[in-house]
Amino acid sequence: ASQTFSYGVHFFNVDSNKLNVVLIVPETSTRRDARDFVSIAFAAGAKSVFLHHGAVAAAFGAGLSSCIVADLGFESSYVVAIDDGMVVAGSRVFLRYGGIHALQVMKTLLSRHCKFASSRECEAVARGLLENSSTFLSDENDTLEVITVKSPDSGEMLRVKCGVGPRVLSVWGVFEPSIFRASGPLLPKRSPGYESGNDSESAFLDMVTEDTSRGARATAARPLGMFPENDGPEGDFLPLEAAVVQCLEKALETRGPGTTTVNDYRKRILSAILLTGGLSDVKGLGPQLQSRVEAALEDTPFANDKVEVLESDSRENDADALAWKGGAIMGHGEFLGDMLVSKAEWKERNVKCFRENAPFYW
């Protein structure tokens, strides 16, 4: 990461000592991760650093200040509510599946019905099908999709034909997680996060900062990137539409008194469900998720609320670039000056700076 930062500074021919860095931190990052990212930026010569969540950056990149962000990543996914440019505390729902599990399903299907020179060749074909022809449109005519993949072993170009079944089943675990669970071992179960301050994560930070006391606001807040336990028997294997509904319910539970009416608050958050991450590019995900969320809301007091899912095909921006665009927007915000942490401040006070300056609960 340090070499990448230094290369970027050299490539754009800028003086790093005059460079203010907007650091977009993934939602799954711990406080220790965030501290390491900031240390790398300063070690590479940054003048000052501004820190914010990846979900908020993605929302800004799509021109939204309030929404629900569903990030379907490679190893894991999450759903989180954003309101007025802030992550709603306690609304994150972590999902223990992602693109790697869709890839595993595709590999399993191919290996059972096709012969490959090696496992590497099988994975190359599976990846090519997943990235170029996977779909959530299960009612399509079963026409053969044709792609070309280069064999990693022989270097030859392989012409691959595949029907709609494997192309749908490989990604359908987003709505039926048991498919992903059956495809092989998943990631270890996450801890519920920092609650009492006795975890190793907090002990590490206390040692670094020599700070064993916290204000009432910081003590009551969940630390960066930690997720509460998901409710219900499915745990981290919730279907995506159920995770969206649970995220909304958690956001309503933590609504601050006097901020706005419950109805306005709910409609503002639910007005847009923003899809990001690699799997969000799969054809048909947006309409499928929208219909499923609307069906899931029928048994709740929110049955008549309007739901709109924003996918990459309906915007000018690629889903994977939204956080980058949002970070650039943040870099030109009027609020940025008050929240920048200088290298001198970081050296003297370390993470204490972000407990006071970051636009979220540290």
Image: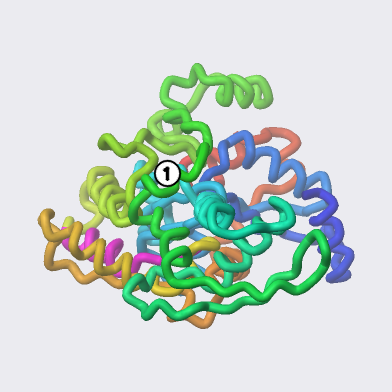
Q: x, y (%) of residue 207?
A: 66, 20
- SS of the residue at dot 1? strand
Q: Nearer the viewer, residue 335 or 184?
A: 184
Q: Nearer the viewer, residue 281 or 32?
A: 281
Amino acid type of disc 1?
Answer: Phe
Residue positioned 77% across, 54% down in the render? 47
Is 284 left or right of 161, judged from the image as shown? left
Which residue shows up at 44% across the image and 47% down it?
180
- Queried whether the magenta region covers residue 20, the answer comes back as no
Res. 73 in view: no
Q: Compared to 348, does 117 lie above or below? A: below
Residue 287 spot, x, y in % from top left: 32, 73
Q: Image point 30% across, 62% down: which residue?
A: 269
In the image, is residue 267 part of the stretch drawn in magenta?
yes
- The residue shown at (43%, 71%) is 164
Q: Which residue is mark 1?
A: 94
Extent of the magenta region: 263-276
Tag count: 1
In the displayed structure, 134 sits above or below 362; it is below
209 over 115 or under it: above or below: above
Q: In front: 232, or 153?
A: 153
- List x then y, in percent, for residue 352: 60, 34
Q: Quadrant of residue 273?
A: bottom left
Residue 333 x %, y %:
56, 67
Residue 85 shown left or right of residue 150 in the figure = left
Left or right of 283, for residue 261 = left
